[in-house]
Image (cartoon, rainbow, N blue to C red):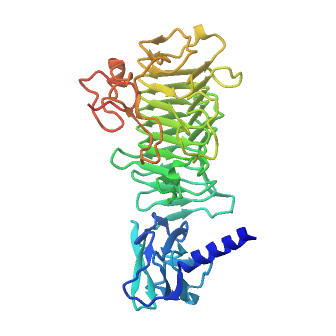
Amino acid sequence: MRKYLFLIVCAMALLGCKEYHPSDDPSLRLSFSTDTLSFDTVITEQGSATLQLKVYNRNASAMVIERIWLEDGEAFTINIDGEADIARMTNMTIYGGDSLFVFVRVTNFGPMSEDTPVRFEDILHFHLASGVTQDVLLEAYDQNVTRIGKSGCGRTEIPGDLTLTAAKPYLLFDTIIVGGKLTIDPGATLFMHRGACIFALSDVDALGTLDAPIIIRGDRLDHLFDSVPYLYAGGAWDGIYLQSENPCAYRFSYVDILSGKIGLYCLSTCIAPLPTLRMDGCRIHNHALYGLVLSNIDALITNTEISNCASYCVYCSGGTHAFVHSTIASYFGFTNIRIQSVAKEDAAAVYIDNLSKTEPFTTTSFVNSIITGYLPNQLVVATPFDQYYPGSFIGNYLKTDSLVIPHAAANVYYHSTDTAKVFINDFYKYKEYIYYDFHLDSISPAIGIGDSIAALPYPMDRDGFSRADLIPDAGCYQHQP
């Protein structure tokens, strides 16, 4: 009994520490978790994620908020401790040491005509019974887009040619099937909604430039956490599929294909001649399945980074494929924070399948390139007789334990005792805001190992730096001292 009496007395003493009678002292102020609540860029009429503002009374005395209101009240909506009607939030008492939660969303920018992002702002006012008014600034950027397809309709068929320009970004819903030639102009941006994909059934010209690359990515522009944009999470959209019964020509230059399930899937049913893919200066990064699939197609891939895929970064089956000055790095999910919806498979960065009985012979060559990752073996050549495989590997940095073919020369191989870093950063350090960086480290074993003759047709690296008059490095980035 004494024990319970003691607890009651202690509780009463603690309660006595707070002053429940509201103070009208004009020197008392509320505290806010931030004085400016900033949203990431929001696509027009898409709405935004919900951000949280916390309001504290750090004083001993209770305080009364007579009224809370938005100065403009057009673009943002407010929910306070579960109450969505801000007009009802009057004469609220916050006791000393207590707080309340304010949830804010962007819901309506209104009609937009500008093609570039436009800044919107509003002010959230808190008027206290003491006569003091305190403010929090709300700000967001609106991006107008051109929509293709409608969410939920399944697919949108475009039987003829389609040209996507750089005038303003595109927002693509569901499955977009292009029957004619697909042209994507330099500087174009394609935002892909969850589940969206492109099927190109004819020629493709996606010809960006170093200064005006083409960006293809998911449409979530906000953050999972403060230091983790949704762009860092793979599987945000489906993929790009090049499928043809005819010998089409696909040309990609300076195209960034980011964070889908599949980056680029090239599949042909042709017998001969095969379709051709020419890819230069591109980046296929962070996909929840494959990066680049080449099936029954001839391809030349140069100055390109293909990185961080949960399964194969590159899968080759049927056709002749040449990779020159390309970086293939498999570090998907190599971080101390779980942001991916899938785990890394026990799959090599590059898989060359020469076992098919229905597709043409597979001949794949790598010159002045990098194939590596955090798993022990990153290169598999599946062929009936290794000693007769006609593919070649010259001047590369390779992490493999299974390469036994006649045409492999002047390569540098990873060894478990190696201590030198290959890249500037192969681990995502989210607390430090440091993302993966597959440029070469200053002591990288890939520096100065490339074949000079093979590098002559490619005097510039992916960043536009010269390889001329230098011993070429392996990979798509020449190290800059």
Where's residue 65, x and y in %?
Answer: 49, 87
| Foreground pick, 267 / 216 | 216
Residue plotted at (36% across, 18% down): 451
Residue 60 in percent (x, y) is at: 47, 79
Residue 340 appearing in the image: yes
The residue at the point 29 percent across, 28 percent down is: 467
Left or right: 451 as drawn, with respect to 37:
left
Q: Give above or below for 98 relative to 263.
A: below
Horizontal side, residue 275 vs residue 282: left or right: right
Q: Nearer the viewer, residue 258 or 431?
A: 431
In the depicted view, which residue is nearer to us: 40 or 217? 40
The residue shown at (30%, 38%) is: 464
Quarter of the figure with the C terminus: top left
Which x, y percent locates residue 11? 63, 74
394 or 94: nearer the eye?
94
Rendered residue at 56%/11% (across/down): 404
The quarter of the image holding the N terminus is bottom right
